[in-house]
Image: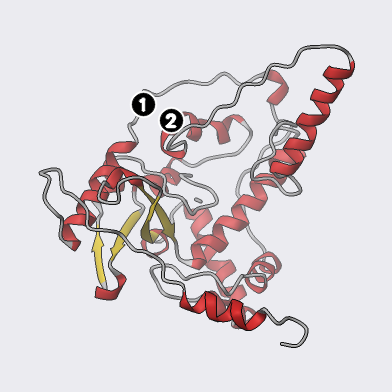
Amino acid sequence: MEQNPKLLHQIVNNQSKVKPGVSPLQTSEGTTATASAAAEELANFHSTVFCLKECVTLKLHPLLSPTDTLQDMTVNAESVLLILLGLNTKKSPGADEITLLILKQCARSLYTTLRDLFNLSLNCSMVPMDWKCGTITPIFKGGDRSDVSNYKPVTLLPVISKVLERLVANELTKHLEGNDILSIAQHGFRKSHSCLSNLLLTLDDWMLAIDNGNPIHACYLDMSKAFDRVNHSILLQKPKQHGVTVNEKDTTYVVLKVPIHELEPDLGFKAEVRKTVRNSLLRFTGALIDPVNS
């Protein structure tokens, strides 16, 4: 306390913060929705945001053709243990309520068993239903709080499924970077890359253009609901075209993810909505590799 007089104030301030929940929503008929009706309204809205597009066949540029392929992916025990020991215990658990603290403290007892489960899942091209069940919290973006379109769904998936995603993401990244498939302009979702590195590279290009007396034209795009607008037929073709062997059964991870809309936590209300994802391939924020996840 003597070294940091503001510490007590920070602790009290953090503990006294009250996060606003979901305000009373209006149904399509204009009436105030109950908790269960609100869950249905949110589910119905988010299922209509994303529209399936016609399948598009991609032509891979010769420069992007990988020299080797990634197939029969397996994970080793050391990688599983490393991820478990690095878990951030301050983050919230998923729908299974298995906390990150438990997994981290029990890492040395669980990592070999989890390795076997992960490899079985990868070899069978199937993901257990419980690993695909996420707690979805509607986050208010702005505007009218009673309008369902002003909320975005943020998913808390089970930690075990997130560990598997991290392992797969690491292997995919190693394959993509090892074959120089990623563009030098790709700064998002890459290690040692960020908005700052993107800005530095952009400013360097601009300064070079100014020094050479060349004009600079900049175009900025900000897409609303960007993840919902991803064409999944294209997305599912890209791994194959970049040398990643994809079993057709892998797509069951896309169509069978079961979300749970959770509203009014003080009432303990939960509504399970299975039809949402099965009828339209929704992408919920929170997964690392989605829809093949986050």
Question: Is residue 264 positioned above or below 165 on the image?
Answer: below
Which residue sits at x=67%, y=74%?
85
Disc 2 to disc 1, how far (Cα)? 8 Å
Residue 135 located left or right of residue 106: left
Q: Nearer the viewer, residue 181 or 147?
A: 147
Question: Residue 79, percent across and down?
Answer: 69, 64
Give the number of callouts.
2
2 and 1 marks in contact (CB < 8 Å)? yes
Which residue sits at x=19%, y=62%?
35
Q: Nearer the viewer, mark 2 or mark 1?
A: 1
Residue highlighted by disc 1: 53
Amino acid type of the residue that numbered disc 1 sits on in the rendered structure? Lys
- Badge 1 density bin: few <14, some 14–19, many ≥20, Cα 10 Å: few
Question: Is residue 194 positioned above or below 268 on the image?
Answer: above
Secondary structure state at the residue bearing disc 2 = helix
Question: Residue 137, percent across and down?
Answer: 37, 59
- When asked about the image quadrant of residue 166, the answer is bottom right
Q: Quadrant of the N terminus?
A: bottom right
Which residue sits at x=49%, y=62%?
161
- Badge 2 density bin: few <14, some 14–19, many ≥20, Cα 10 Å: some
Amino acid type of the residue that numbered disc 2 sits on in the rendered structure? Ser
Q: Nearer the viewer, residue 180 or 39?
A: 39
Residue 116 located left or right of residue 21: right
Question: Is residue 70 positioned above or below 83 on the image?
Answer: above
Residue 80 located left or right of residue 282: right
- When asked about the image quadrant of residue 202, the answer is top right
Question: Residue 254, percent across and down?
Answer: 40, 45
Residue highlighted by disc 2: 233
Which disc is residue 112 wearing? Answer: none
Secondary structure state at the residue bearing disc 1 = loop
